[in-house]
Amino acid sequence: MGLVSALQFPYRESREGFWGEQTSTLNWCEEDYNISYYCAEVVNTLTNLVFMWLGLKGLRDVISFGHSRVFILVFLGYMVVGLGSMAFHTTLKYEMQLADELPMIYTVCIMAFATFGYKRPAKDQALIAAGLVGLAVFITVYYLYAQNPVFHQVAYGLLTFSTVCRGFYVMEHDLRPQLKQRNPEETNWYMRKMYTLAVSGIGMFLAGFFIWNIDNIFCRRLTAGKNQILLPWSVVLEGHGWWHILTGLGGTLAARRLAVKTRLLTGEPSIPHDTLACVAQQLFGWQGDGVHARLGAFPERSTCATQVQLCRAGEWH
């Protein structure tokens, strides 16, 4: 306890900040300007760096392994959400709140297109894209008019839920039969890995949502506890920051699962000796002895690149 007490330091007494009065329709449990004069919510701002880190990793691997270009848009959207959220929590201005919330809708719409547009004719894909664009425009216009955060939260939740459900349907209706046809012995192994990614991502989202609610409901008690514990230890009680971290990890797992599923479904006809093990090596670093995709972790790039080259040369089985 002596060491802990020695490392404690208090919050700022003044609550005045560089960005002036709050104009956003939302404010979170982290007290405004309690750490820095220049940043309204320091913890809620910095925890958005997880979106930047995982977004960059996702872009790197989409490009390295030649996945569908739609996933470039997904991970770019992921990073835009992180930047917008950082701007919102730094300033607590309404314009920056929109920069946080609206890209969430647009990014999940891109993921919905990748999910619902799979194996559809070009005409149907165009209709799905037009429908999602129209939906995004409607949500944007109505939200700007109503300025009701609950509407945004419900719209985002329903879009995410429908995309996840469609993803599970495709896994069972399309992916499992294709895997059985190509290599029955490895089907269960691949499906287990896919469901591990899915359940892990959903679990992180739900854990983040649970903490988000605890942070809102018990804010006064948590604030009293933070003022007792003091910095830097009190940051662990910033529930909205944990929401950022857990949804960031859950979101990137969802995006990677979608990319993996699409790659397994489409196969890789340009690769000689097109076995499942060969395709798996290109799924963000998967190997036959396990999955390296958990929480965005990957094998060494040189090792992975060498194996992909061997795979394309027909020497990796």
Image (cartoon, grey):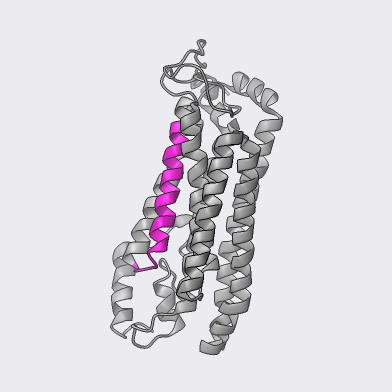
Q: Is residue 193 shown above or below 180?
A: above
Residue 253 visible in the shown view: no
Given the current orientation, which residue lies at the most extreme top position?
14
Answer with the quarter of the image where residue 62 lies.
Answer: bottom left
The C terminus, quarter of image: bottom left
For the record, the magenta segment spans: 65-88
Residue 185, magenta (yes or no): no
- Which corner quadrant of the image does residue 131 belong to? bottom right
In depth, the one of 114 and 297 nearer the eye is: 114
Give the image quarter of residue 75: bottom left
- Residue 93 position in % (x across, y down): 48, 26
User: Of residues 316 and 58, which is closer to you in this image?
Assistant: 58
In percent of the image, x 59 and y 65: which residue is there? 196
Q: Residue at x 37, y 88 (%)?
A: 273
Q: Is residue 152 above or below residue 189?
A: above
**Quadrant location, the N terminus:** top right
- From what the image shows, is residue 1 above or below residue 266? above
Q: Does the magenta run of residues contain 85?
A: yes
Task: Judge whether residue 7 can be spotted in this image.
Answer: yes
Side (left or right) of 273 relative to 21: left
> Please, is residue 240 above or below residue 108 in the view?
above
Q: Position of residue 193 (x, y in %)?
A: 56, 70
Residue 219: image x %, image y %? 67, 27
In this image, 102 relative to 269: left or right? right
Q: Position of residue 259 (x, y in %)?
A: 46, 66
Identity of the residue drawn at 50% across and 10% down: 14
